[in-house]
Structures are given as structure tokens and as C-alpha cells.
């Protein structure tokens, strides 16, 4: 069997990866809610973080689906599963367990160590969910459910319905509920590549209207729109589609996007470190705290990747890639493992 040729990097996709990284880091610096991060209860940063939640994880997942479609499952399920386990689960176990240990020591958080990762650990739920999505794709691709627009549409509507009604299993083992939450966005990204999806211009009017209504909810002018709703689904999918169609090239964001997997895995360590240092310093400037936390959250993981890349074993354990000797390394997104 011939090896799949390496494709040139898509800098517009890297740009969007970089954007997704910044949105994620801002969220964890400010705080997913008023109980964590900088514990901001109201004001611009709280409102911006809450609004961007409609597109933050959807964008990460949409791009994973888009990239997967460029190198889809080809029937060799053993190799496919092995690749995903190495690329996703090995770093999740190593980095996620390290996070749990340090978090337990520094914040006196009591983890159920027997079920660690069976029950997802903090932000590493995304990696587990993505792995489950890939396992589901083996079945859907083998049954050719995603080969034609008609079959794809049925699958997309089913998962969209589960998303909109907020369907969840009572036990969130291996972040299966996260996989249900992410699946519509992954499929949307897949469709954009596989079917060269072109939506009517009216879809951007829908995006503008739904976004405006959701923003009104953030501002307490109307009832807050839940992420797991039809409106939330429309904002997530259409905003990702619109960003992709921009074919936006930005060198700064593209550079960050080049390290997106490392940033996702390691940024939380540097954000927490920055917050603890700032707590002991006479700095009472919110914007400065956000900037410092965000810069460390970006630069720290990039430095980690450069360091672990010096050794094949550390590179495998931390990033899930076994570096071959004397071969030029091409960084890949977890979706391309």
C-alpha cells in the first residue's frame, strides 16, 4: 500500500486553529464561570467569554472534522484505532494525569484516582470525546453513511437533534456526553471538505440574527440562550463555516495554530501558574492579569513542545507522535494522527 503523501499546510486552517487557541485561553484565564479563573462575575470580559462559548469548542471540533476529511478512514481499522490511541490517549493519560496530581496537591482537590480518566479530567474531556467520535466514524464510514449528501444529512440531523434536546447519558464515562455535544460540529467540518459545501448567503443573515439574540441574552435583555439549543447549534456551525470561507491568512495566528495541540494540552499549567504568581503580587489591573495569563498560556506550551521534541520518547508521551530519525517532521493536528 502506498503511503499517503504529505499535503502542504493550509495556512487558513492554521489561522483558525490559532484563533481557537486564543478563545480557549481567554476562557480559562477569565474563567468558564464566576467560580473559576479570575472569578469575574460581570462586565465586558464576563460577557465576552460567555458569548464566545457558542463558538469556542465548536471551532476546535469543526476544524478536526475538516482535517479528518482530508485523510479519512480508509478501511484499515486496526491502524486507524492504533493511530488515534497513540495521538490522543497517550498524551491524555500522561498530561491529564500530571494535571490531576498537581491540581490535587496545589488546590487540595480530591480526585477519584480509581476512575481517573474513565470520568474525564477537566479540559481533557475534549480529547476523550474526540477519540469516541473517531471510533463512531469507523462504523459510519464502513456503512458508507457519510459517502453521499443524503446519508450524511440523515446522520447530521440525528446528532443535531440529540444536541438540541440536550441528550445526555446518566454516567459520563469517557466523556461520551462530550462526544454527543461535539459531533454536529465535527460532521459540519467534514461536510465542508468532502462535499465542498456552499451555503446560501441567507445563512449569514441567520447567523447575524441568532448571534444578536444570543448576545441580548448575555446582556440580560432576553432569556439567556442555552448552548445546547437550536440557536446555539446555528451559531456554532454557521460561524465556523463563515470563518472557513473567509480563507483568512494571518501569520501570527497561523504560528500559534501550528502548536494548537500542545497549547490545548499544556496551557492550563501556565495559566494557573500565572494566576498564583499574580495573586502574590501588588497588581490590581484586570487587563494586565488577562494579558499575562494569556501570553504565558500561549508561549509556555510552545516552549514545552520544543523541549519534548528533542527526545523521541518524551515526544511520544507528551504529544502522541513517534519521531522518526533523520526525517523532516511535519506537525499535525490530533485529527490527522
Image (cartoon, helix red, strand yellow):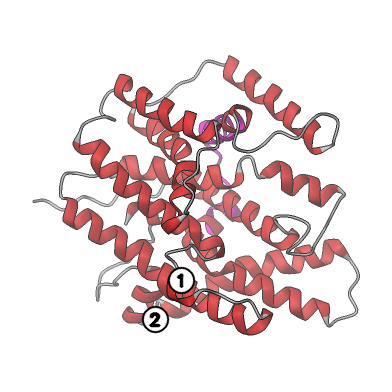
Q: Is there any visible trace of residue 72 in the rendered image?
A: no
Give the x, y percent position of residue 312. Answer: 32, 79
Q: Is residue 316 above or below residue 15?
A: below
Position in image of residue 113 (x %, y %): 48, 77
Q: Quadrant of residue 322?
A: bottom left
Tell me which secondary structure the magenta stretch mostly adopts.
helix
Q: Which residues are magenta?
A: 235-255
Q: Is residue 130 magenta?
A: no
x and y percentages locating residue 61 in the rendered image: 48, 45
Q: Is residue 35 above or below residue 20?
A: below
Viewer-proximal residue among 50 and 60: 50
The residue to which callout 2 is attached is: 310
Q: Which residue is mark 1?
A: 116
Tell me what residue is drawn at x 32 percent, y 21 percent: 149
Q: Give the side of residue 142 with respect to residue 335, left or right.
A: left
Q: Please say whether residue 239 is one of the residues in the magenta stretch.
A: yes
Which secondary structure, mark 2? Answer: loop
At 80% across and 31% down in the image, what residue appears?
A: 216
Residue farthest to the front, as pictured: 170
Residue 132 in sight from this viewpoint: yes
Q: Is residue 111 above or below residue 236?
A: below
- Closer to us: 21 or 117: 117
> How far is the residue under mark 2 from the one under mark 1?
29 Å
Q: Mark 1 or mark 2, which is nearer the start of the sequence?
A: 1
Q: Position of residue 212 (x, y in %)?
A: 75, 27
Which mark is on residue 156?
A: none
Q: Kindly identify the residue that appears in the image at 40 percent across and 35 percent down.
A: 187
Picture residue at 72% right of the left edge, 68% below the top: 293
Amino acid at each position: 500500500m502506498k503511503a499517503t503523501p504529505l499535503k502542504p499546510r493550509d495556512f487558513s486552517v492554521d489561522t483558525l486553529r490559532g484563533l481557537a487557541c486564543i478563545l480557549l485561553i481567554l476562557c480559562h484565564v477569565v474563567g468558564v464561570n464566576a467560580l473559576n479563573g479570575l472569578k469575574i462575575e460581570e462586565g465586558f470580559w464576563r460577557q465576552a467569554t460567555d458569548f464566545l462559548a457558542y463558538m469556542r469548542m465548536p471551532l476546535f471540533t469543526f476544524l478536526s472534522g475538516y482535517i479528518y476529511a482530508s485523510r479519512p478512514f480508509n478501511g484499515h481499522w486496526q491502524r486507524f484505532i492504533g493511530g488515534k490511541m497513540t495521538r490522543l490517549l497517550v498524551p491524555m493519560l500522561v498530561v491529564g494525569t500530571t494535571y490531576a496530581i498537581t491540581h490535587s496537591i496545589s488546590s487540595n482537590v480530591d480526585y477519584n484516582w480509581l476512575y481517573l480518566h474513565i470520568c474525564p479530567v477537566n479540559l481533557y474531556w475534549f480529547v476523550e470525546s474526540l477519540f469516541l467520535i473517531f471510533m463512531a466514524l469507523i462504523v459510519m464510514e464502513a456503512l458508507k453513511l457519510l459517502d453521499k449528501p443524503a446519508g450524511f444529512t440523515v446522520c447530521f440531523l440525528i446528532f443535531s437533534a440529540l444536541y438540541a434536546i440536550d441528550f445526555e447519558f446518566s454516567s459520563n464515562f469517557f466523556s461520551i456526553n462530550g462526544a454527543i455535544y461535539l459531533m454536529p460540529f465535527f460532521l459540519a467540518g467534514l461536510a465542508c471538505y468532502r462535499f465542498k459545501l456552499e451555503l446560501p448567503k441567507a445563512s449569514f443573515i441567520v447567523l447575524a440574527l441568532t448571534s444578536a439574540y444570543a448576545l441580548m441574552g448575555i446582556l440580560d435583555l432576553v432569556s439567556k440562550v442555552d448552548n445546547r439549543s437550536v440557536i446555539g447549534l446555528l451559531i456554532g456551525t454557521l460561524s465556523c463555516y463563515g470563518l472557513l470561507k473567509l480563507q483568512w491568512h494571518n501569520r501570527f495566528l497561523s504560528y500559534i495554530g501550528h502548536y494548537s495541540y500542545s497549547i490545548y494540552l499544556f496551557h492550563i499549567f501556565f495559566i494557573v501558574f500565572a494566576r498564583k504568581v499574580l495573586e502574590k503580587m501588588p497588581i490590581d489591573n484586570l487587563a494586565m492579569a488577562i494579558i499575562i495569563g494569556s501570553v504565558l498560556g500561549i508561549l509556555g506550551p510552545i516552549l514545552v513542545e520544543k523541549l519534548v521534541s528533542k527526545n523521541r520518547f518524551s515526544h511520544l508521551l507528551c504529544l502522541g507522535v513517534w519521531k522518526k530519525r533523520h526525517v523532516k517532521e511535519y506537525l499535525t493536528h490530533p485529527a490527522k494522527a
